Image (cartoon, rainbow, N blue to C red):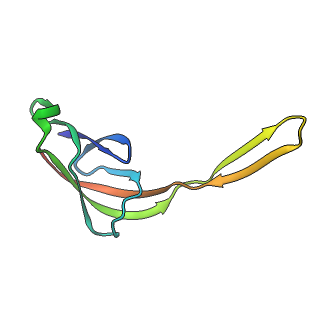
Amino acid sequence: MYAIIATGGKQYKVSEGDVIRVEKLDVEEGSSVTFDQVLAVSDNGLKVGADAKGATVTGTVEKQGKGKKIIVYKYKRKSGYHKKNGHRQAYTQVKIDKING
């Protein structure tokens, strides 16, 4: 059984017991989170759209953190312009507990 959920502008295919990293959610570690924007659920058959309207996915927040540093370097030749910047994207690590669909 799996479900396709949407959160943070991205879509994830999840099953029970999976651990996923999603865009930062404003939830404390150890607490429960519910994803109600479910696009598709596969149990015996595939339910998509209006058939999967009442489906939810619940999970437990394991960790809040930041990803690896990405270097952003801007450069223009002949003008002496260069700029170096770094970015670390914040994420929330969630363990999927149950798919209700």
Residue at the spot x=68%, y=46% of the render? Answer: 72
Labels in figure, total:
0
Is 67 in front, or is 54?
54
Confirm whether residue 49 shows in the render.
yes
Quarter of the picture holding the N terminus: top left
Q: Position of residue 47 (x, y in %)?
A: 13, 32
Q: Is residue 24 above or below residue 101?
A: below
Q: Position of residue 3 (x, y in %)?
A: 22, 40
Q: Is residue 21 left or right of residue 2?
A: right
Q: Position of residue 91 (x, y in %)?
A: 44, 56
Q: Quadrant of residue 75?
A: top right
Q: Position of residue 71 (x, y in %)?
A: 67, 49
State the residue lying farthest toward the front: 79
Q: Is residue 92 left or right of residue 80?
A: left
Confirm whether residue 43 shows in the render.
no
Residue at the spot x=11%, y=44% of the render? Answer: 54
Quarter of the picture holding the C terminus: top left
Is 18 in front, or is 3?
3
Q: Is residue 51 above or below residue 35?
A: above
